[in-house]
Image (cartoon, rainbow, N blue to C red):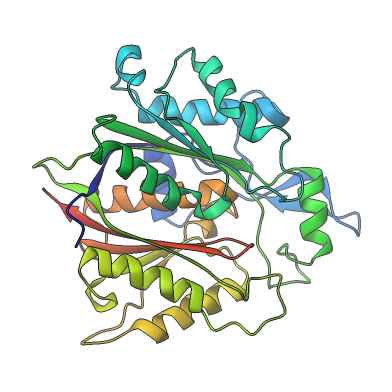
Amino acid sequence: MTEFQLAIKATGLVTSVGLSAPASCAAIRAKLSNPIETAFVNALAEPIVGHEVPLAIPWRGRYRLVHIAALALKECAAELGPKQLAQVPLFLCAAETGRPGREAGLDDSLLADICDELQIEFAPHSEVVALGRVSVAYALARCRAVIEAGVAPLALVIGVDSLLREETLDAYDGAQRLLTPANSNGFLPGEGAGAILVGRPSTQAELRCTGLGFATEQAHVDSELPLRGDGLATAVRAALNQAGCGLHDMDYRIADVSGEHYYFKEAALMVGRLARGRRAVNELWHPAECIGETGALAGLAMLVVAEAAARQGYAPGRRVLAHFSSDHGERAAAVFEYGGA
């Protein structure tokens, strides 16, 4: 078991079902959803249904991302002043390079744009982690490294993304990956932002990250190779080993699956490969059923939901396995446990 753990200290979340973490988590707990007909159309000139954040002013493009990211970040860091934030590194989870319709210049200026919007500065170790849905796990690994080394007492992870862009939707529609009346093997596109503040565990009850694991899946969603679930199984096994437990010790799972059969099959194959002992972990939470496929936000949304469930006492138990999969083959997993240090 790793000697160093991370604890979630605060959260923020902006989605199509709520403009704050409490509102979004309450809606997701109740399995409420708010898909609407967007301004975009598919190849048949039919409106594309998606999960759009209900903003008072309908900003578009780069500023929309900056604005919703700022909302989530302000909620998460509400207890920190400017001097404290200047000592906190920020790890920004963003869409992976090469995704159709990806906002230009994300790696170069999005982090600076968010800082300008809030008129704050973060520690020099701040960086962009542009790996889409798996970004949050890699960001947690970076947080653990800087906090364990004593570089900073706290770290922030924020994810912001929107699939509600014409080029993005055209690509997914052309690949028949969007959920429509004629296609059940697809997802509803969404958008939003989420943030978590992490640090060393305290004696108070907190959701603590006890293990992380990473791997690569050769048979990714765009390949023609047979799916065996090797990559996800490897990542989950590594996270469980680091946490010093097995899959049977988990009380439930939470994942970034959003409707496509491929990812549900992968999750089932992983359980089949690793399930041992007295019970199998059958309960699977997937916030995307309420907020849609949100790209780089998906992992943050999962952790904010898991933290709220643990703190408020409606989680199935103390331990949760979170697993993440990207379209390009990256796989990651994280084990969390609720309790004191």
- Closer to the camera in the image, 181 or 131: 131
- Identity of the residue drawn at 33% across and 53% down: 306
Q: Quadrant of residue 12?
A: top left
Residue 341 is left or right of residue 268, and the answer is: left
Q: Position of residue 31 (x, y in %)?
A: 46, 57
Please give left or right for residue 168 compared with residue 296 in the image: right
Q: Quadrant of the N terminus?
A: bottom left
- For this view, does 29 lie left or right of residue 35? left
- Total residue callouts: 0
Q: Residue furthest front?
A: 149
Residue 283 is situated, as x and y percent measured from the top left of the image, at 36, 73
Residue sticking out furthest to the right? 44
Q: Is residue 85 left or right of residue 136?
A: left
Can residue 22 be seen here? The reply is yes
Relative vertical location of residue 265 with respect to residue 297 in this rendering, above or below: below
Residue 203, image x, y percentages: 8, 42
Residue 13 in view here: no
Q: Residue at x 71, y 51 (%)?
A: 99
Q: Position of residue 276 (x, y in %)?
A: 28, 86
The one of 53 and 205 positioned closer to us in this rendering? 205
